[in-house]
Image (cartoon, grey):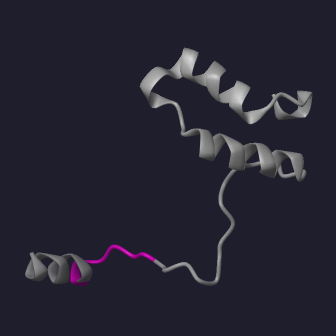
Amino acid sequence: RTALNIQAKDIHEELCFVCGDETPSLKTIEEWSKYFREGREEAEDEVRSDSLAIEITSENIEQVCIVY
């Protein structure tokens, strides 16, 4: 729909009609629309250097259990 120059707000309204409570937020739709206007073909977030890496291990699970 972005390729057809349909505004993110209108796309969001259409998705609300179809998906109901499962509709992504307007902010998310705006971000996806921006990505597609920039020529990206997927809406997945890019890896950022300031992001924390998350790994699920037995040791991590034990540490969380100790905290709680």
Q: Magenta includes 28?
A: no
Of residue 19 and residue 12, the one placed in the foreground of this image is 12
Residue 1 at x, y = what percent? 81, 28
Question: What residue is drawn where x is 88% and y is 46%?
Answer: 37
Q: From the viewer's perspective, is 15 left or right of 59? A: right
Pick the quarter of the image with the C terminus.
bottom left
43 over 53 or under it: above or below: above
Where, by quadrant of the figure, is residue 51 drawn? Answer: bottom right
Question: What residue is drawn where x is 65% and y is 72%?
Answer: 47
How many numbered discs?
0
Of residue 60 and residue 11, the one placed in the foreground of this image is 11
53 over 4 or under it: above or below: below
Q: Which residue ends up furthest to the top in the rendered image?
A: 17
Residue 44 at x, y = what percent? 66, 54
Where, by quadrant of the figure, is residue 58 drawn? Answer: bottom left
Residue 32 at x, y = what percent? 71, 46
Q: From the viewer's perspective, is 41 left or right of 63? A: right
Question: What residue is drawn where x is 77% and y is 43%?
Answer: 33
- The magenta region covers 54-59
Of residue 31 and residue 64, the one placed in the foreground of this image is 31
Residue 62 at x, y = what percent? 15, 80
What kind of secondary structure does the magenta stretch mostly adopt?
A: loop
Q: From the viewer's perspective, is 33 left or right of 49? A: right
Question: What residue is drawn where x is 60% and y is 39%?
Answer: 26
Q: Magenta includes 56?
A: yes
55 over 14 or under it: above or below: below
Where, by quadrant of the figure, is residue 4 drawn? Answer: top right
